[in-house]
Amino acid sequence: MTDLAHLSASIAEQIKKRQPFPVTTGIILGSGLGDFADGLTEKTVIPTSELDGYPVTSVIGHSGKVIFGKSNGVPVLAFQGRIHFYEGHDIRLTALPIWLMKHLGIRKVILTNAAGGLNKQFKVGDLMLISDHINFMFRNPLIGKNPDDFGPRFPDMSDAYSKDLRALAATVALDLKIGVQTGVYLGLTGPSYETPAEIEMFRLLGADAVGMSTVPEVIQAAHLGIQVLGISCITNMAAGITGQKLSHDEVTETGKLVQKKFTDLIKGILQKC
Ligand code: HPA
């Protein structure tokens, strides 16, 4: 694989040719949360299959599209569908959307995902503002030669999930009377779900939610100086918490149930950021 700085620059050039207006905020829509893009106006939809060099993704509930649109007049670039490590891609590729956003001039990104809840105060359908993460993927998208023109060799991760954006999101949620949780996201490779014993260990380690994405994207965003707001939708309680079996259908179904409050929250945040 060529390095991500070059690959992403070439894909960004193809996107720029079809870009209708400038954008400074991006969003990646997680499993079952893709409908947010339906409500955008003045849309330009680019299927990722039309972008030379863009990896093919295959997860149900993750159609691959890059969408320029406006949310109540605010320009946004939405990625419907993500590149997951468990599909067999190089870990660096999972952060490609963040590189593309960098080339397109984006400074803030909202990363959303479906996650299993570990915190026993959480309920299925809760939205969680991510305060921090634990990288249990044991992979890092920055390994390799550092593109010094873009970011430092050793990026700081102490405000990787921007405190300012989190505070803004909490205020918007309060105004809209949407209850939100806050917590630590623990990222795993998947694709198997966790065992109950693993979940118990992660709870002891301080995780509130688990999922199979986001972590490499956040690391890449920290490297490229893009501010991150992370939001997890608790689509199920994690293995062993309720004794129920886990399925991807439950994940996408819960995504659909929370769609309205999720969309309202995102729209409200976009108005303010
Ligand atoms: N575990 C890992 N990833 C997930 C889960 C889960 O319980 N729910 C949604 N994504």
Image (tube, helix red, strand yellow):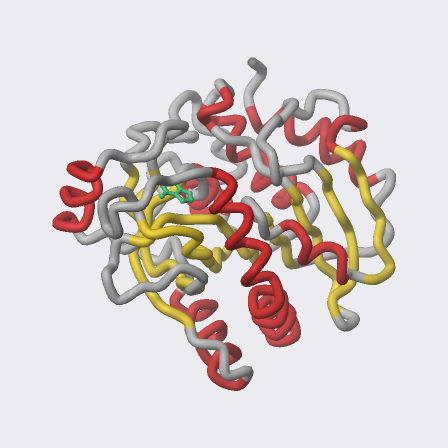
Tell me the residue at 61%/26% (across/down). Answer: 58
Q: Is residue 83 visible?
A: yes
Tell me the residue at 43%/38% (across/down). Answer: 247
Identify the image quadrant of residue 45: top right
**Residue sitting nearer the eye, 252 or 76:** 252
- As drawn, is 228 to the left or to the right of 273? left
* Residue at the far bottom in the pictured view: 175
Ligand 1 is located in which of the four quadrants?
A: top left
Residue 187 coordinates in the image, percent (x, y): 34, 40
Residue 141 coordinates in the image, percent (x, y): 43, 30
Residue 239 coordinates in the image, percent (x, y): 27, 42
Q: Is residue 273 visible?
A: no
**Residue sitting nearer the eye, 221 or 214:** 214
Tell me the residue at 31%/45% (across/down). Answer: 244
Quadrant location of the N terminus in the rendered image: top right
**Residue sitting nearer the eye, 215 or 261:** 261
Quadrant location of the C terminus in the rendered image: bottom right
Tell me the residue at 31%/61% (across/down). Answer: 183
Identify the image quadrant of residue 146: top left
Asked if 80 appears above or below 141 in the picture, the reply is below
Tell me how many marks there are.
0
**Residue sitting nearer the eye, 58 or 187:** 58
* Residue at the far front in the pictured view: 244
